[in-house]
Image (cartoon, rainbow, N blue to C red):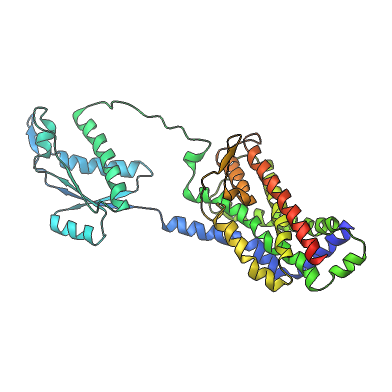
Amino acid sequence: MIWPVFKKSFREQLRNYWILILTVSLAPFFVFVYYLINEASQPVYDILILNLDEGIVQQDQRVNLGDELLQFMDSLIQTTPGIPIKTSVTHDENSARIQLEQKKADALLILPEKFSETACNPDSTRPELEISGDLSSIPYMISGIWLGEILNRFMMAAIGQEPLYSVKETALGRSGQMSEFDLWMPGMLILSIIMLMFSATIAIITEVDQQTILRLKLSKMRSWEFLMGVGGTQVLVGILSILLTLAAAVSLGFEMQGSYLLFFLIALLTSISMIAFSLILAALTRSVTDVLIVGNFPLFLFMFFTGAAFPMRAKAWFQIDGYGISWQSLMSPTHAINALNKVSIMNSGIAEILPELGSLLVMTFVYFAVGLWAFQKRHL
């Protein structure tokens, strides 16, 4: 009985091509949207520099550390990728402060008149530099941090002092090589499968809406056979959807790392989980119109509160063998996204994602049990 139901469900899915297009195209569309957001939101902080340094004559040579600092900053910014600041020289303090007030600049660095004299004379007091801006502004805070780091480097180079310590940074997996766009992609890939809740629920509820469920009942077909036949088609839709989303992400620069076998395992289990959840949604509705209305509530929950649309993590209620359980854990895509993050970012193996896979299986079983019971009570 499973194969005839599968063929019938497959043909029905092709007839409802608008539902199919919506299911497989929404996540790739969001991939392009997130790419544009990422490209448009690359932060650059504007820093104005007022150089009042008069310089000094040292060993018959003119020394102006203010000018040297400007050259050092320009060289460092051009040769070091990832420094999100842009510097420009100003010659009038009043106009510079007006730019700060109008948010045309984020910070103002003022080099005093005796900057070279105090910096080059070990017996004098330390040079006092002034950084001005809106202290409550995040761009000012970030600008101040970068200025502090650059000034420290310059002063050590100017007076020939070695750093007191060195820091070695070790990235987990390939996290140090990833952009913000890359970090969004695991959630987007799972979002492509979350959309199955519409396609799968409509495939199930159509039988109820068109009253063909009566013929299926008369054929002595069991509920699980009906669900296996319909679910087989939906798993194919889910795999197609996640592959299209992955292709869209790769075309925009995303590099899939880790095991592709684990990737497909996560995709398969998540597809089954969404089909199981669709049973619950089908039990609550009687028509396609009901599905399109009622289905928006779980869609938004799964989209925005599992980490699919943007990363988020709730405080754990308790832990099982070190794996935190929270209200997010009641939504199976949460575990799928965590597992895919580990595989694609940390290059983890199956041993490292066993807690996520186990939680995903548990929630899938719960969805199936609740959905099957509710669907039989309501429609069978």
Asked if residue 121 lies left or right of residue 228, the reply is left
* Quadrant in which residue 204 is drawn: bottom right
Q: How many marks?
A: 0
Residue at 10 percent of width and 30 percent of height: 121
Q: Position of residue 46 (x, y in %)?
A: 28, 53
| Vertical comparison of 332 with 21: above or below | above
- Relative to 254, is 24 above or below? below
Tell me: 92 left or right of 267.
left
Observer-nearest residue: 198 or 185?
A: 198
**Left or right relative to 155: residue 255:** right
Q: Is 136 situated left or right of 208 in this image?
A: left
Q: Nearer the viewer, residue 239 or 271?
A: 271
58 and 152: which is toward the camera: 152
* Residue 51 image position (x, y, % from top left): 15, 47
Q: Residue 319, position in %: x, y?
A: 58, 38
Q: Position of residue 260 (x, y in %)?
A: 66, 43
Tell which of 359 and 140 is nearer to you. 359
Residue 84 visible within the image: yes
On-image quarter of the C terminus: bottom right
Residue at image location 58% in from the left, 59% down from the top: 301
Q: Is 149 located above or below residue 209 in the figure?
A: above
Query: Which residue is drawn at the image coordinates 26% and 40% (left, top)?
Result: 148
The quarter of the image holding the N terminus is: bottom right
Is residue 62 among the parts visible in the rendering?
A: no
